[in-house]
Image (spheres, rainbow, N blue to C red):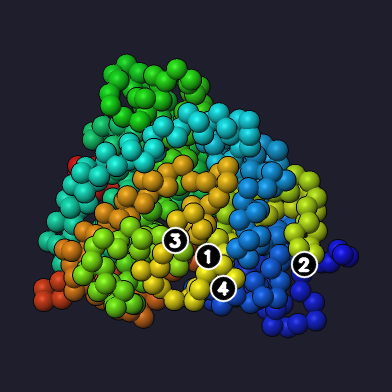
Amino acid sequence: MAQRDAAPNGDGGLRDIVSAVSRGAPEYRQCPHPLYAALREQDPVCRLTPPHGIDTYLITRHDDARDALSDPRFSKDMRGAIDTYHAVYGSFFDALDDNVLFSDPPRHTRLRRILRSAFTPRRVEQMRPRITEIAQTILDECRRAGTVDLMASFAFPLPVAVLCELMGIPQEDRPEILEQFAVVTRSRFDPSRRAELKAAEERLQHRLERLIQDTRDHPSDTFLSDLVRAEERLDDPELVASLWVLFFAGHKTTAYQIGNSVLNLLLHPEQAARLREDPRLIPGAVEEMLRFEGSVETSTFRYAAEEARIRDTVIPKGSLVQIAISAANRDPERFDAPDDLDVTREGLQGTHLGFGHGTHYCLGAPLARLELEIALGCLLREFPDMRPVDLAETRGAWLKGPVAAFRGLEHLRLVLEPSRPDGDPGADPDEPTLAAVASGQ
């Protein structure tokens, strides 16, 4: 079979689609699913031309995506392609990103083996009462407000509070540490904030080093305490990088997934009614939400460590490889009626790619599932009549920008109890998060 160029030629419609995806056009970020459907059909291994100038191949079909996620030819070791990594993400403090997410076996195997003890299903299930208590406390504050931005008031504070407890960050230290996390996450992809970012990342590294030392001096029943006392240990730079990636990946993905799930239940009230009538459906509904509108739209950094062929497309060595999780999870070759939300859909766990697949399957998947289950259960029970303040505004609130890493809402303004007057809907999702956690919620 002859090699072909994955870029479209001779078809203006397909060229427009490829252009929109390459540059992160607003219409693509607003609703990517029709574009992904066209690519699955017409160009399933598509060569993009993104602004950073690195050849990038986008994989959109489920079977190809599943295989690519575990294909050792597609490396995640950023140190093996550091110039490419900097071209995509900017030249910032590499120490934080030298972690389990951006590594290959055998180093990845060792890091993952040490970290995964925190996220065994049994250990996570033991956290159910405390996570439920945290969720209920935050929702009690939401009830007093009446009208809220759910992203700022609940979706972000819940996973942040859970992670703080998992890491054993004392209440009095949370404002300082979380503010540093917020500065870093705000500045990462903004070239104008490069100096601010470098200083913030250095401060965050030093503060996490202090947290690790404090945990050694005062052990407790926390994940971080277990890590520093483990027989097989991470060194301090590995611990710092691990805490960073667990926090960064563990709060944004869950927060955006809460927002996506709530919005789609509001848009499909008959599905919400089924969950209220039978809460036992909620765990399965979480899987369907992850498939239907997951918060991870495309895979994280991968590059071709050697030339690789997928279907009739040759991906040259050194090229970036992006796996469109959102496209794969709506592939009609894998899922019946994939564009329909069905909370009674069965057999999804292990088939959708919302948590990835293979060696890099999400470490925090058990915890994320539990948080989503509790969040949806509490919201449906406490606020059965919640509704959006302005549905048109909400439909336009999807994250923007050229990088389709996260699929989520910038805000989700809700009237929780329509019989009550509106309150203050809130603002930036990061800042209220800090306030909520710092106040002990």
Question: Which label's residue is closer to the chain start, 3 or 1?
Answer: 1
Dots 3 and 4: beta carbons under 8 Å?
no
Residue carrying label 3: 347
Residue type indicated by callout 3 = Gly
Q: Secondary structure at mark 2?
A: loop
Mark 4 vs 1: CB contact within 8 A: no
Task: Give the alpha-carbon distance from disc 3 to disc 1, as whole Å.
Answer: 13 Å
Q: Amino acid at mark 2?
A: Ala
Closest to the camera, between mark 4 and mark 1, is 4
Q: Nearer the viewer, mark 4 or mark 2?
A: 4
The answer to which image quadrant residue 374 occupies is: bottom left
Residue at 58%, 42% (x, y): give it. 359
| Position of 257 relative to 417 (above/below) | above
> Which residue, given by chain and number where applicable, does mark 4 sit on?
332
**Which residue in the protein does label 1 denote?**
329
Label 3 or label 2, whichever comes before in sequence order: 2
Q: Earlier in the sequence, mark 4 or mark 2?
A: 2
Amino acid type at image mark 1:
Asn
Q: Secondary structure at mark 3?
A: loop
Return the residue at label 2.
6
Let me know if residue 102 appears in the view. Answer: yes
- Identify the residue at the far front of this view: 347
C-alpha gap between disc 4 and disc 1: 9 Å
